[in-house]
Image: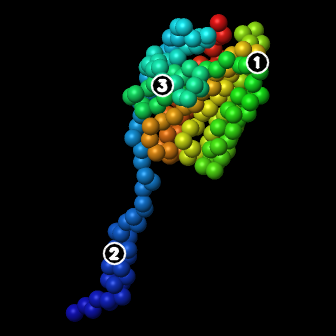
Amino acid sequence: MRIISVKPIFFLLLFAAVACTENSVPKPRGYFRISFPEKQYRLFDTIYPFTFEYPVYGAIVKEENRQGEGDWISVSFPTFKAKIHLSYKDISGNLNQLTEDARNLAYKHTYKADAIDEQVFTNPQKKVYGILYDIKGNSASSVQFYVTDSSRHYLRGALYFLCQPNKDSLAPAIDFFKADVVHLIETLRWK
C-alpha cells in the first residue's frame, strides 16, 4: 500500500485556489460618445453692423434685450444644448470700460477654473482685434471673447452649455465648439 503525502496535495489545492481568483479593479466612470457633425459654415449677414460665418448645424436666435445692454443674439445648438451668446455695442468713448468688463466677466470664473489662457486676435486689414479667453476647469462658460475695431464696434461672446459643468465629460464638446468660435472671430467683418 502506498502512502500519499498530504503536503503536495495541500500546496496544489492552495495554488489552484489562489490562481483562480480575479482581482477586481474598479473601472473608471464612462461618458456617452458624442458624434459631431462635419464642419460647414454659412454667412450671417442681416441688419446687424457685422457679418460672420457660423456652423450650418447652428441657428441664429434673437435674444431678449437685457437692460438696454445692446443687441443680443445667440448661435444656438439645440442638439448639443449649447449656445454662443453674442452682444453688440457701439463704442462711445468707453472702449477701455468694455474691454475691462469682458476681462472681469472671464476672470469671474477663476474660483472654478484650473487656468485661463488668453489668445489674441489681430487682423489690421479688416480692423478686427480681440481676445479669446479659454477657461479650463468646471466653469459655467469655457470660452469667452470680445472683438472690436477700436473705434466704433464691439462684440462680446461666450459659449455656454445647458448642463452642470464637468470638464471631463464636456471636453470633446468644448473643443468642438471652440473651433467654431475661433472661426466666427476669424470671419467677422464690420459693415
Q: Which label is found at residue 187?
A: none
Please identify, in this view, whether the residue under mark 2 or under mark 1 is nearer the observer. Answer: 1
Label 2 is placed on what type of residue? Ala
Is any atom of residue 178 visible in this view? no
Q: Which label is found at residue 17?
A: 2
Task: Decide: few, some or many residues near mark 2? Use Cα within 10 Å; few <14, some 14-19, many ≥20.
Answer: few
Label 3 is placed on what type of residue? Glu
- Residue at the spot 77% in from the left edge and 13% down from the top edge: 124
Q: Up-down: is 67 above or below 107? A: above
Please identify the quadrant where the N terminus is shown: bottom left
Please identify, in this view, whether the residue under mark 1 or under mark 3 is nearer the observer. Answer: 3
Is any atom of residue 89 visible in this view? yes
Label 1 is placed on what type of residue? Ser
Sequence-wise, the earlier of marks 3 and 2 is 2
Asked if labels 1 and 2 touch by Cβ distance under 8 angstroms, the answer is no
- Residue 173 percent location from the top left of the image: 49, 34
Sequence-wise, the earlier of marks 1 and 3 is 3
60 with respect to 2 (left or right): right
Sequence-wise, the earlier of marks 2 and 1 is 2
Q: Write down the residue under mark 1.
A: 150
Task: Decide: few, some or many residues near mark 3? Use Cα within 10 Å; few <14, some 14-19, many ≥20.
Answer: few
User: What is the secondary structure assignment of the residue under circle 3?
Assistant: loop
Q: Write down the residue under mark 3.
A: 64
Q: Quadrant of residue 141?
A: top right
- Residue 43 percent location from the top left of the image: 53, 9
- Residue at the spot 44% in from the left edge and 37% down from the top edge: 162
Asked if labels 3 and 1 touch by Cβ distance under 8 angstroms, the answer is no
100 with respect to 169 (left or right): right
182 with respect to 124 (left or right): left
